[in-house]
Amino acid sequence: MKRQIIDKMEAWDESADRKPLILMGARQVGKTWLMEEFARRRYVGNTVVVNFMKSERLRLRFETTDLDPKSIIEAISIETGQKIVPGKTLLVLDEIQESPRALTALKFFNEDMPDLAVMAAGALLGLAVNRKKKKRDANSLQLARASFPVGKVAFLDVPPMTFEEFLLAVGEDLKCNALKKCDWKMVGLFHDSYCELLRKYYFVGGMPEAIQSFSENGDFALVRDVHRAILRAYDEDFAKHADGPLLAKIRLLWNSIPAQLAKENKKFVYTALRPGARAREYEVALQWLEDAGMIRIVRNVSTPQLPLATYEEFGAFKLYAHDIGLVGAMAGVPPQILLDGDSLFTHFKGALTEQYVLEELTALGLSPNYWSPDNIKAEVEFLLQIGTMICPLEAKAETNLRAKSLKSYIDRFNPRKALRVSMSKWSSGERIDDYPLYAIPEAIKVLGQ
């Protein structure tokens, strides 16, 4: 596996104001592997790992005594038999959600022992709470993000693996390099091959275990088994961390995502969950899934002005999952539909295309909106704020480049740049630049120049 986010971890390690780093993200996106790979690259023989799921003594140490860093590293050294030397050692705290006070201790590591490199990760960190004090009432749900030592730690969001990382994992390094060079003449020669690989990625998705399975055996059935296992684990997490009515609402929201995306108008509709459902009934459940890193919420902006976030309409949004492979598994999409080309889009109406585009944008650190005005029947799938520029991006599932909504947006707001991504080859026009769906990072890179 090759993960591009390693570069950000290395930049963190070299920063002058290095704070303890917390890796955030949904379960099984590869946080533990990333810490292991980072340690292998930069701290060979000088890494001490604490797994709070496995070490009962150290978990009790954090929960029952003071949080003085010197005392903590002494206890860890005794438990692990490894010496911890600030300036030389990397301390990894894995499954840290099992010890809320270990999260609090990161503040003191930052203040009292800044030379020690400390990295932490865990499942559902956005939900980690002090269980002894947490009320079981859904309306008083306390989310962990508020209990983090804000200002004393650094955060790094870990998304699923991108299409380019998929290319590297399946041995298509040369194709990946050609994309990064924006060598459109060379890329165009192999356009059909890129499209075929993209359709495979639509099925496999970006969960590291699914990509590893596919890269090792190429068996779509085994990949789907991985998806089902991950979905079962997620459902077990729901049951473990939520009670009664909240649990039922979380499951309803999560399981509704494929059907909501399959609609022609993909705006989220609460009454699709059950007749008479209202937004306020599902606010906590929606927040739960977002804090768990399992969903992405894209809100409508009917008035595209800077800054976009201040014009968001909170009652009008689309709901996506965090991984396209899991969406396909939830919808029961068979691999032959994906591999047969355009038949994919007649069966699932471009839902997977939007899901894929959003994942690529999110991996680039973008938080897009969409545009859908009330007074006309039009919609541009994504609005991007890059610096002082607002750029519309239309996602086309096929090679048909008719773009009535995008042209309507251009006529009304005259943006400096407009993007369209599809299964067509790259081309640059007077008003719209066309990029193939497999080249979204390159489109954004050029946009920012």
Image: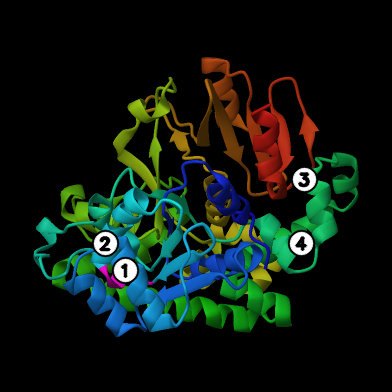
Residue 210 screen position, x and y as percent? 59, 74
CA separation in Å, label 4 and label 1: 52 Å
Along the viewing direction, whichever of 269 and 209 lies nearer the viewer:
209
Q: Relative to 187, does residue 135 appear above or below in the rendering? A: below
Front label number (4 vs 1) = 1
Contact (CB < 8 A) between labels 2 and 3? no
Along the viewing direction, whichever of 46 and 195 lies nearer the viewer:
46
Q: Relative to 371, does residue 1 appear above or below in the rendering? A: below
Relative to residue 131, is residue 240 drawn left or right? right
Q: Secondary structure at mark 1?
A: helix
Relative to residue 297, is residue 174 drawn left or right? right
Count of all numbered marks drawn on residues in the image: 4
Contact (CB < 8 A) between labels 2 and 1? yes
Front label number (2 vs 3) = 2
Q: Relative to 42, does residue 376 appear above or below in the rendering? A: above
**Does label 4 or label 2 sit earlier along the sequence?**
2
Q: Which mark is residue 68?
A: 2
**Does label 1 or label 3 sit earlier along the sequence?**
1
Q: Which residue is mark 4?
A: 196
Q: Which residue is mark 3?
A: 180
Classify residue 180 by image quadrant: top right
Q: Which residue is mark 1?
A: 72
Q: Secondary structure at mark 4?
A: helix
Instruction: Give the residue type at disc 3.
Output: Lys
**Does label 3 or label 4 sit earlier along the sequence?**
3
Q: Quadrant of the C terminus?
A: top right
Along the viewing direction, whichever of 251 and 309 lies nearer the viewer:
309
Magenta segment: 95-99
10 Å crowding of disc 4: few (<14), some (14-19), many (20+): some
Q: Secondary structure at mark 3?
A: helix
CA separation in Å, label 2 and label 3: 47 Å
